[in-house]
Image (cartoon, helix red, strand yellow):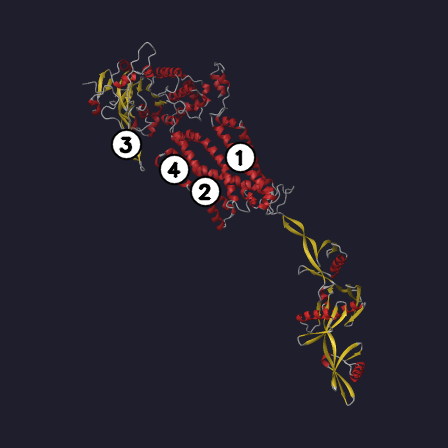
Amino acid sequence: METKNKKSFGTQKLDDERRVRVLSPGMLVFKRFVRNKLAITGLAILIVMFAFAFLGGLVSPYTQSQVFKHDEEIMKEYATCMLSTDFRYTVREGAEFPDAARATAVLAISKGDASFTYGDKTYSLVKEGDEFYTFGDALMIAKTRTLAGKFSVDALPETGFVASPEFVAAAEAAVASRSAQFEADGTFYTLINEGKSSSIYHVEPIALASKLVVDPYNESQTSLTTSFAFRYAAELASVRGEKEFELDGTRYVVTGEENDMVVSTMDGEPICSISDILVSPNANDIFLTAEFKAVIRETIRAKETKFVYVDETGENVDYRIDRVNTTYTVRTLKESRVITMFDFPSPQHLLGTDSNGMDVLTRLMYGGRISLMVGFVVVFLETLIGIVLGGISGYFGGWVDTAIMRFVDLFNCIPFYPIVMIIGTVMDKMEIDPIKRIFILMAVLGILGWTSIARVVRGQILSLREQDFMVATEATGIRVSRRIFKHLVPNVMPLLIVQATMSLGGIIITEATLSFLGLGVKYPLASWGSIINAATNVHVMTNYWFIWIPAGLLIVLTVLGFNFVGDGLRDAFDPKMKR
Amino acid sequence: MNDDFVLEVKDLKKYYPIKAGMFGRVVGQVRAVDGISFRIRRGTTMGLVGESGCGKTTVGKTVLRLNDKTAGEVLFKGKELFDLNRTELRRIRPQLQIIFQDPYSSLSPRMPVGEIIGEAVREHKLVPDAEFDDYITKIMRACGLQPYHKDRYPHEFSGGQRQRICIARALALNPDFIVCDEPVSALDVSIQAQIINLLEDLQSEFGLTYLFISHDLSVVEHISDTVGVMYLGDMVEYGNKKDIFAKPMHPYTQALFSAIPMPDPTIKMNRIILEGSIPSPANPPSGCKFHTRCRECMEICKTVQPQKYEAGNDHYVVCHLYGK
C-alpha cells in the first residue's frame, strides 16, 4: 500500500500529514492500550494471575485436596501410680469374706480389737505385722471325749486335720486344766469344753488385708501371685523379715528392702515384687512388667520426674512423671500420624496449611482456576445471551423489542441472592457432585446476569440504527449481513468488550461471595471465596492470617486487574481518544 | 414517458401513524408529505426549500425508497421505484445516492475512509478488483481528498473533509441522481462555498442530477435550476429558479424570499414577518394549510383547498389568489 501510494503520488510533496505513519485499526487500539500504564498494570496482574492459577497447578507438587499429615510426639498418659493407702484384701479360695465385712474389719483394725462380728459370724483379727492383718474364722478341726477316764481325740475328716501325738497330749492337758487354749506344734488351738466332750477349734485365716501391692513379673504367674496362700506366705515372710519361705514344697527367696521386695524362686527366677506403690496402666491392653514398675517406683522414691526405660525393641523411651497429691501420672511421648492443621508458612508449605491440612498455596492455585473459569464462562454465557436477545431486540424493534424488553424487566425482578441461595440449598439437599455443582452455578449466574448486557446491546444498536451511516449503507445497497457485521457489530463490540471485562470482576466477586456463604464451590474443590470462608472463625481469623489474607488479596488484585484492563480497552477502542 | 426526466414524483404522500395506548392503536397521522408532485430533468438541480419540519427530508428519503410511501408514484427513469423487489432494488441502489446533512454521524466511526468510500463499489462490483485502488484514488481526488487519507478514520477529518468523504462515497457508485439533504447547513460559510462548488463541478463533470434540499435560499438560488417551495407537506409553488426568485407568487414564498439577507447595507429590507409558528402536520388547518399565517387570507382559504394554478413556463402555485 505504502509503496504503491508513493509510486502513484510520487510527485506530491511530503507535507506534514503524510509523515504521520498510518496504522491499522487493530494496531491503533493496541498502541493506545499499551500506552495506558494502568491498563498494562492490570494486564500484568491478570497474566500473573492466570499463570498462577493455570500453570501453578502444574508446577505445584501437591494436589488441591491432598491432606498433609505428620508424625508428632504427643504426651500420652501411660500409667498411673499411687501410694497404696488403702487396704487390699485377698480372700482364701472357697472362703467367704463379703465386701461389706471389710468396712467392719477396717473399723476393728483402727480400734485395735481382736475380733469383730459381721452378720452372725465372728471373725478373729490378728495383727501379723505393720499394716498386715489376717482375718480368721474358727474352724472346728477335732472333738475330744473323755470316756471312763480315757481321753481320745477324733479329728474331723473334712478339715483334713490329722492329730499328732503331741497335739493329743497337749489337748488332754488343756482339758484337764480346763484352759481354753493350748499350743501344739507351734500352733494355738481353742478348746471349748462341753462337759464330757469338748470341741477343738483352730483359727484359720481366711482373708488378709495389706497395703502392699504384689505385681507378678510374668502374666502367667498372675494366678499364683493372686492366690491367698502365696500372698499370705510371702507377706508373712516379708513382715517377719524372713528371707525365705516355703509353699507347697517350693522354696521362695525374698530379696530387697521393706516395701520394695522381690520374691523369686531358688533358681533366681523372679516371681513378683511387693511394694507399697500401686502402678496401674491407663489402657486395658497394656501389661506393665514388674521391672518397669520397679523402675517407676525407684524414680518416684528418688523424687525424680523423668526416667528412661528400654522397651522390648531395645529402644530408649523417655517417660515423664507428674505428681498430683499422692497420684503420679506416667506419661510418654507417643509418635502418631496427625493432620498438619494450621501449619505456619514453611519451605514445604509456602503459605502454610489450612484447617483440613491442605496446602493453602496449592488450593489458591486450583481455586484461582475455578474462580477465573467461572468468571469467564459466566461472562461468555451472559454476553452470548445478551448479544443475541439484545441484538434481535434492537435490530428488529417493534413488538419483538417490546416482548424481549418486558422479558428483561421480568428477569430483573428476580431477587438474585435469594434465588441463588435457594438453588444452593437445593443442591446441598440433593448432594450434587461438587464439579457438577460448579457447572450449575455457572449456568445460574449466566442466566441471571444477561439482562444488563442485552440492554446495553439493544440501546447501542437502537441508536446506531438511526445514525445516518446506517441509512447510508441502505442507500448504497449494502447487504444486510455486511451491515450487521461490518457496521453494527464493530460499533457495539468495544462497549461489549468493556462491559464483559468489567463484569468479569463482578462475577468473580459474586462467585467468591457465594462460595464464602457456602453456596458456591464446595469442598474438596477450592475457590478463592471458599478459602476466605475460613475467616468466619474468629480463632482462624486472628491467628492464621496466611489462610485468608492471600485469597482476599488475589480476589482484590484480579478484580482490579480486570477493571484496569476494561478501562484501558474502553479508552483504546475509542477512536476519538488522542493517540 | 420522457427520458429527459430522471425522477418523476406524482402525488407522493407519506404519513406517519401516531400510535397510542397499550396496543398501539393508530389514533392519527402525521402528514409529513401530503401529495406532492415534481420532476427533475437530467443534469439539472432541483432545489427544495421550506422551513423546518415541512417534510423536505422525508421527500428526499422517500424518493430514494429509504422510507415507505403512503401513496403516489416515484418514477426513476420511468420505473416505479416501489415496485422493485429486493434484488432489483439493490441493483438500482448505486444510481440513487444521498448526501446527509450531518457529516459527523453519516460516516461509520470504525471504518477507514477508503473502506467507507469503496465498500459499496466492491459490493456491487462496479470496477474490477485490479482497478479498485486507482478508482478510489480518482474519486477521492475528484472530491478534493488526498489518497493518503484512505487509511484514516473519519474522526481525523474536519467537517468539510467529512462532507467530501460523503460526496465521494455517493459519487463512487457512479450515480445518476443524488439527494443532497442540506449538505452544507452544518458547515461554515467558506466550506459551504467549497462544497457547493464541488457539487457543481461534479455535476458538470459526471452529468449528475441533484435534488438539493435546503432552507438556505441563497444556496438554492446559486445551485438550482428549478425550485420547489414546501409548506407543511405540500408543495405550494414550483418553477424555474429565475421565475420564482424574480416573481414569487405564493404569499409564503414571498415571505420566505423576503428573508434573504442582502449583502448591501443601503438597501432597505422589506421583510414579511410571518405570525405564529408552523402548525402541526398531525392536525393541519382546513382549507389552505397556510391560511393561519397568511396575510392575504380570505374566507375561502379557510374552508376550500386551493388548486394548482399554472403560471406558465412550468411554474405553478397553489393559492386562491390566482386563477379566479
Q: Residue at x 20, y 23 (%)?
A: B300
Q: Which residue is mark 4?
A: A405
Q: Residues within 10 Å of mark 2 (few under 14, many from 20)?
A: some
Q: Residues within 10 Å of mark 4 (few under 14, many from 20)?
A: many
Mark 4–mark 1 CB contact (< 8 Å): no
Mark 3–mark 2 CB contact (< 8 Å): no
The three-letter code of the residue at mark 1 reads Leu
Which chain does tag 1 point to? A
Residue A327 appears in the figure: no
User: Quarter-wise, where is residue B202 in the image?
Assistant: top left
State how far apart marks 3 and 2 are (Cα). Answer: 43 Å
The one nearer the camera, A227 or B143, is A227
Instruction: Tell me the tag on residue A416.
Output: 2
Tally the marks. Answer: 4
Q: Circle 1 sits in a helix, a strand or a loop, which is it?
A: helix
Residue B257 rendering spot, x and y as whole percentages: 29, 16
Residue A1 appears in the figure: yes
The one nearer the camera, B110 or A424, is A424
The three-letter code of the residue at mark 3 reads Gly
Residue B149 rendering spot, x and y as whole percentages: 45, 20
Residue A448 rendering spot, x and y as whole percentages: 44, 41
State how far apart marks 4 and 1 are (Cα). Answer: 32 Å
Location of residue A159 with respect to B273 vertically, above or below: below
Instruction: Tell me the tag on residue B28.
Output: 3
Instruction: Tell me the tag on residue A560.
Output: 1
